Image (spheres, grey):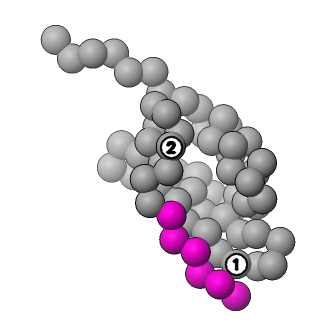
Amino acid sequence: AVPFVTVQTPRALQQQVEAEGWRVTRIRTKDGCYRVHARNDKGDRYEGTFDPATLRPMKIEIEYD
């Protein structure tokens, strides 16, 4: 049997990254993970992949403006 995994909501993820200064422009699901597109106050672009169960970052890319 496969264990049941509770998935967090995209809204919970948005609140988490916005508390860190991200301004979310898009959240989508890709390959079973959440993919976040965002910017910060300086205009730098953030793209992160997050585990949907724990909301822990798996990969984050920052493109500085």
Marks 2/1 in contact by CB < 8 Å: the verdict is: no
Give the magenta part as a residue range: 60-65
Looking at this rendering, what residue extends furthest in the left direction? 1
Residue 4 location (% of width, % of height):
33, 15
Q: Which residue is under mark 1?
A: 44
Q: Residue at x 70, y 88 (%)?
A: 65
Q: Which residue is under mark 2?
A: 56
Residue 62 location (% of width, % of height):
58, 74
Disc nearer the start of the sequence (2/1):
1
- What whole-number distance in Å separates the C-alpha atoms at marks 2 and 1? 21 Å
Looking at this rendering, what residue extends furthest in the right direction? 41
- Residue 64 falls in which quadrant of the image? bottom right
Left or right placement of residue 24 versus residue 42 in this view: left
Amino acid at circle 2? Arg
Mark 2, other Cα within 10 Å: few <14 / some 14–19 / many ≥20: few
Magenta span main SS: strand
Residue 33 location (% of width, % of height):
41, 46
Q: Residue at x 50, y 50 (%)?
A: 57
Looking at this rendering, what residue extends furthest in the bottom direction? 65
Left or right placement of residue 19 versus residue 38 in this view: right
Q: Residue at x 21, y 17 (%)?
A: 2
Q: Secondary structure at mark 2?
A: loop
Q: Secondary structure at mark 1?
A: loop
Identify whether 27 is placed above or below 7. below
Identify whether 1 is placed above or below 34. above
Q: Residue at x 59, y 81 (%)?
A: 63
Identify whether 61 is placed above or below 49. below
On the rendered image, what quadrant is the N terminus found in?
A: top left
Mark 1, other Cα within 10 Å: few <14 / some 14–19 / many ≥20: few
Magenta span contains residue 12: no
Looking at this rendering, what residue extends furthest in the top direction? 1
